[in-house]
Structures are given as C-alpha cells and as structure tokens.
Image (cartoon, helix red, strand yellow):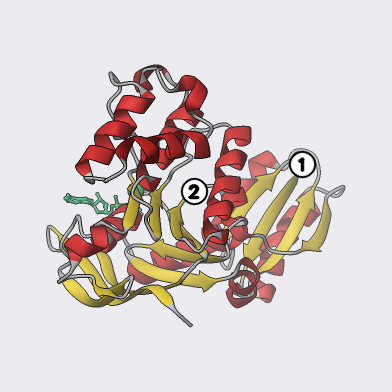
Amino acid sequence: MTLAIDVRGLSKIYGGRAVVDAIDLQVERGRIYGFLGPNGSGKTTTIRMLCGLLTPDAGEGQCLGLDFRKEAAAIKRQVGYMTQKFGLYEDLSIRENLDFIARLFELPQRRAAVDQALERLGLQSRAKQLAGSLSGGWKQRLALAACLLHSPRLLLLDEPTAGVDPKARREFWDEIHALADEGITVLVSTHYMDEAERCHELVYIAYGKILARGTEAQIIADSRLQVWSLQGDKLGPHLAALKAAPGVLSVAAFGNTVHVAGQDEALLQQALVPLLSQLPGLRCERAAANLEDVFISLIASAKDNFGGEA
Ligand SMILES: Nc1ncnc2c1ncn2[C@@H]1O[C@H](COP(=O)(O)OP(=O)(O)OP(=O)(O)O)[C@@H](O)[C@H]1O
Ligand SMILES: [Mg+2]
C-alpha cells in the first residue's frame, strides 16, 4: 500500500488547548478521503499543517514521501491547497488570476498551463470575467483550476463546495473523481453528507481527535448504533424530552420520519415507551443507521468523554 499522507501524533496547541490532539492520519494514493467534523473540530488546522503552512507542535511522518516537517517547501510544490474562504483576487479576471498564480509557481509554459486549466474546468467562455462578479459555483471552479495549475499530486480541499448549489456541487465532485482516476490523491473537508457518500474513505474528527475512520459502511457498522424510525402526527413537542432521555444519542427529523439513535437497545426502548402511550397512532419501526445518525451520535458521546463545546 502506498500512502500519500502518513503522519502520527500530529498536534497543534492554541492557548494551552490542543485543537488538534495527537492524530494519526494515513491516506492512500489516488483515493478520495472525506474529512468531516463539527465547526472548530480542527479540520482546517490539520490541513494547514499537512501542506506546510502551519508548524505543528508535535507529530512526525511523511507527505508524498517527504518529511512533512523538514521538507515543507518541497511538499508545497506538489500540493494543491484550496482554502475554506475564496482566496483569489476579485478585481482580476479569471485568466488574470490564473496567470498570476502561474507566475508565483514560476511555471515554464505559463500560457499553455493557464489555457489547459481554463479548458479543464470549462472556464474559457468566462476567461475575461472579473472573479468578483462570479457566482459561488464558478468561483469554486476557478479556485480548483488555480490549485491544479502546477499539476499537484495531492489536493487538500477545505470545504470547497460550501454554499454551492447541488448541480454545481455534483459537477465539482465529478471533476474530483476524474482527478482521482488520474492518480491524484484528495483530502477534502465537507459538512455535506451526500459528499461524504462520494468519498472512498472518511475520517471524522471532533475536539481535535479522530473518532471514526473507514468506508461509509465500516463507520456505520463500527458505530453499533441502533436506530428507531418514528412516524406520526404531533411528534414535535415530544422531541426535546426524547433527546434528553438516557441512552438517546441523536434525534433527527428526515422528512416525515424521525430517527432516534443510541447504542444501548434497552435504554432506547425505555425512552420510546412514554411516547408510544401518549401518541397511540405512532408508527415505530427499526431503521438502518445513516452517516448523519452516526456522526451526531459520535459528537454526543464525545461531549461526555472530552467535555467542552465543539
Ligand atoms: N490562529 C488561531 N489561534 C487560536 N485559535 C485558533 C486559531 N486557529 C484556529 N483556532 C481554534 O482551533 C480550533 C479548530 O479550528 P479549525 O479552524 O481547525 O476548525 P475546523 O474544523 O476547520 O472548523 P470549521 O468546520 O468551522 O471550518 C477552533 O476552536 C479555533 O477557534
Ligand atoms: Mg475549517
């Protein structure tokens, strides 16, 4: 197995608090890894340490076969990093932005590289448009074009599709898969469950610690989560009490059904008993856990273990 990222004990401390807390991260070459976790869990901090923009307080290992602490400059030349916030010049056109980046990387065939990036992301027709006047989806496309210019082997994408509509997100993900098919490794952070499902592997972080990893199916199986699906009228007023019941880790509405999840089957059933007597028409049946059930439950358990707020 060849690893594009292989780091152990990676840590970053801010104000005496480990916001990334001794994590081990292994990412196989040519695969798409989804990096998930609540706000403030340490995703951006981890990504910035991996690409050499932030110095870790502890940790060792390799990125693209290079020592990620000692050879940060060499790593940067082979990594495409897409920041969480749009980082290009709004008052430059698409082409001017790409040309500027190509100069920064001192690319020998600058014009050809820019043309190729424009074509790859379908940006030619808008090449002269100012970046600041683009919609969210086109901005993300430009940002991806910019981080592909220097032909990186590893892409670190930090919430690349936040606020982008479903069609543009789908096109973006088609492109990510095309890049992976060409052998490029991708670590991509996201809060969207449909995007998590499009990754080969997932890593879930909270409070700076990795709480789950593996394929979607592995993570769901490892969670040992039991889920009951409820269907009925007037459920709303009862949900707060249900959430507070012992053994209930997550309560979430999916359309017309409510998922109630926990690991302890007996406690879970005990929590549902009062509801069944109060709402006689309630339909209550077992359901398969989905990723969202698992992640919400993981945060609930982590809160008990680590305390604090995510
Ligand atoms: N430069 C800094 N100084 C102090 N604290 C910081 C700094 N950068 C990040 N933090 C803190 O570190 C924690 C992790 O932040 P980080 O941005 O890595 O989270 P994240 O998982 O990317 O969150 P989000 O999903 O909101 O983007 C947060 O509590 C944040 O406030
Ligand atoms: Mg972030």
The answer to which quarter of the image holds residue 58 is bottom left
Q: Which of marks 1 and 2 is nearer the N terminus?
A: 2
Q: Where in the figure is residue 240, as x and y percent of width and height? A: 58, 47
Question: As drawn, is 244 to the left or to the right of 272?
Answer: left
Extreme right residue here? 281
Residue 191 is marked as: 2
Q: Where is residue 111, by image quadrant? A: top left
Residue contact at pointers 1 and 2, CB within 8 angstroms: no
Q: Select label 1 or label 2 by which is in front.
A: 2
Residue 145 location (% of width, % of height): 42, 39
Residue drawn at point x = 53 percent, y = 60 percent: 182
The answer to whether residue 291 is above or below residue 85 is below
Q: Distance between the residues labelled 1 and 2?
A: 23 Å
Residue bearing mark 1: 256
Mark 2: C-beta under 8 Å from nearest atom of ligand 1? yes
The residue positioned farthest toward the bottom in the image shown: 1
Type of residue at label 2? His
Residue that appears at 45% across and 39% down: 116
Q: Does the residue labelled 1 lie within 8 Å of ligand 1?
A: no
**Residue 31 left/right relative to 289:** left
Does residue 252 lie above or below 212 as drawn?
A: above
Q: Position of residue 43 (x, y in %)?
A: 35, 56
